[in-house]
Amino acid sequence: MQITIRARDEEVRKSLEQLQYRLRDLSPVMKQIAQIVRTSVIRNFEVGGRPQWKPSKRAQKESGLTLVQSGRLRNSITARGYADRA
């Protein structure tokens, strides 16, 4: 006895090919992700860190913010998105 199974998967293959083509360049979404991450990091600078962080000794001594002494580090944070990373 011989059993033959034929799968008509042309539509599935076509959909997978389209998905694969779209996933080749993720730069639009990676740019959005990069901006979200940058916004989060900048917010940490604005409030002196995360809520669970203790103020740094320097911040306590100078009545400043943790992470912020001159603003140089904060101002160096950029958002860049590429085809495969943010």
Image (cartoon, rainbow, N blue to C red):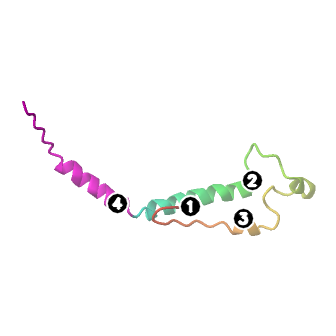
Of badges 2 and 3, nearer the viewer stands 3
Is 2 situated above or below 10? Answer: above
Does the magenta segment cover residue 4? Answer: yes
Neighbour tally class for label 3: few under 14, some 14-19, many 20 plus, Cα within 10 Å: some
Q: CA distance from mark 4 to mark 3?
A: 34 Å
Q: Position of residue 38 (x, y in %)?
A: 61, 60
- Compare residues 70 and 80 and report the one nearer the observer: 80
The residues colored magenta run 1-24
In the picture, measured across the screen, residue 56 lies left or right of residue 19, that is: right
For marks 1 and 3 on the same chain, the one whose residue lies earlier in the sequence? 1
Mark 3 residue type: Arg
Q: Amino acid at mark 4?
A: Arg
Q: Nearer the viewer, mark 2 or mark 4?
A: 4
Instruction: Residue 85 in the image: state x and y as whole percent.
Output: 51, 61
Q: Earlier in the sequence, mark 2 or mark 4?
A: 4
Closer to the eye: label 1 or 2: 1
Bin the neighbour count of mark 1 within 10 Å (Cα to Cα): few under 14, some 14-19, many 20 and up: some
SS type, badge 4: helix
Identify the amino acid type marked 2: Val
Residue 47, numbered circle: 2
**Image point 69% across, 69% down: which residue?**
76
37 or 21, nearer to the observer: 21
* Rendered image: mark on residue 35: 1
Above or below, 81 against 36 in this view is below
